[in-house]
Image (tube, grey):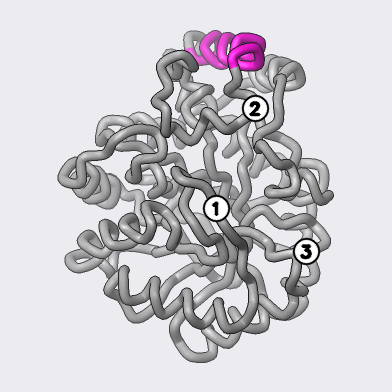
Amino acid sequence: MTAPLVHLGDGLTVSPLGFGGMALTPVYGEVDPHEALKTLHHAVDAGVSFIDTADIYGGGSNEQLIAQLLKERRGEVQLATKFSLVGSPADGYTDVRGDAAYVRQAIDASLKRLGTDVIDLYYMHRRDLRVPIVETVEAMAGLVQQGKVKHLGLSEVTAQELAEAHSVHPIAAVQSEWSIWSRDVERNVVPAAASLGVGFVPYSPLGRGFLTGTVDASSLGANDFRRRIPRFAADAFDANQGVVAAVRTVATELSATPAQVALAWLLEQGKRRGLAVVPIPGTRRTHRIDENLGALSLDLTPAQLEALEQAADAVVGSRSADPNWVSQGRE
C-alpha cells in the first residue's frame, strides 16, 4: 500500500484503512484461529497497521489473538481497543459501565490480554447513561497520564457528548457505524467531529457484508449477530436489495468490486466534509484485505455518488435493535 498515512485527532497517525477485529470472533460464523492469525499478519504485510479490537470480542479472546501478532510486530501496529460493555456480541450484553473504577479495571485486563504496556487508542465502547461522560473521560485521561494509553476515543456518542468529552481531554477519534446504508451520523456527529478536529473511524463500512451482495439472510447461522438487526429481517432484507443493486452497478462501471465502491464512497465523504475518515472493514480472508485496499485508488464520479445516495434514501429498518444503544436514538 502506497497511500499516505492519515492524521486522526490529537496527533494520532494511522494507515488509511484499518482492520476490524470483531470479524475474527464467531459473531458471523465459526473462525479458525490459525487462519485468523494468518489474516492479521497479511493485513500488516499489506500496510494495514491500524488494528481495532475490544475487550468483549470473544470474551477477551480477540485481544489474546491480536497479542500473538503483537509479540512479533508491536512496532508496526497502531493498536485500538475498547471498554465499557459487559457480555459479548454473540451472547448479548448484560451491562454498560463507565465508572472510574471500571475504567481502571478494564485497561489493566486489556493490557494483560494483549501482552503490551500501552494502547495507542482507547475507546469508550458505549455510553453508560448512569455516569456523566465527563467523569468517564476524566478517568480515561488518567490512563494517559499513567502512560497506559496514548490517545482517547469514543464510540457511538452524540455530538453533544463528543463536545463535552473533548472539553475534558482531546479526543482522537469517534467510532460509529457509517456506510452507504447507515447515514444517521451525518446529521450531527460527523459535523461535530469535523469542527473539533476529531477523526472518524466507521465500523461496519460494508454494512456487515450486506453491501457486498454476498449475504443471504436465509443462510445466516442461529448465532449470527445479524439476526438481531432489524434491517436483516426477511422483509427489510428484500426491500434493501435496491441499495445493493446500486453499488453493483457502480462497481461494474468502474471495473471494481462492491466492497471497493462502498469503501471509496466513505473515503469521498471525508474529503467532502473536511474530515479524516479511516474505515475498519473486518474479514476472515486474506484476499479480502487486498480487495479492500483497492478502494484507495478508486474515484467515484458525481453521478455515481448521487446514484448511491439516492439508493440509500430507500433503506428500510434500523441499524440497531435498540436505537438508544447507538447515537441515533439519543440525538
Please say whether residue 237 is one of the residues in the magenta stretch.
yes
Magenta residues?
A: 234-251
* SS at circle 2: helix
Tell me residue 108's x, y (percent).
41, 80
Mark 2, residue position: 230
Name the residue located 71 percent from the left edge and 20 percent from the top edge: 316
Q: Quarter holding the N terminus? A: top left
Residue 161 marker: 3
Q: Quadrant of residue 187?
A: top right
Cα distance between the residues tagged 2 and 1: 17 Å
Name the residue located 57 percent from the left edge and 51 percent from the top edge: 201
Q: Amino acid at mark 2?
A: Pro
Cα distance between the residues tagged 2 and 3: 26 Å
First reached walking from the N terminus: tag 2 or tag 1 = 1
Residue 93 marker: 1
Callout 3: few (<14), some (14-19), or many (20+) C-alpha neighbours within 10 Å?
some
Extreme bottom residue here? Answer: 146
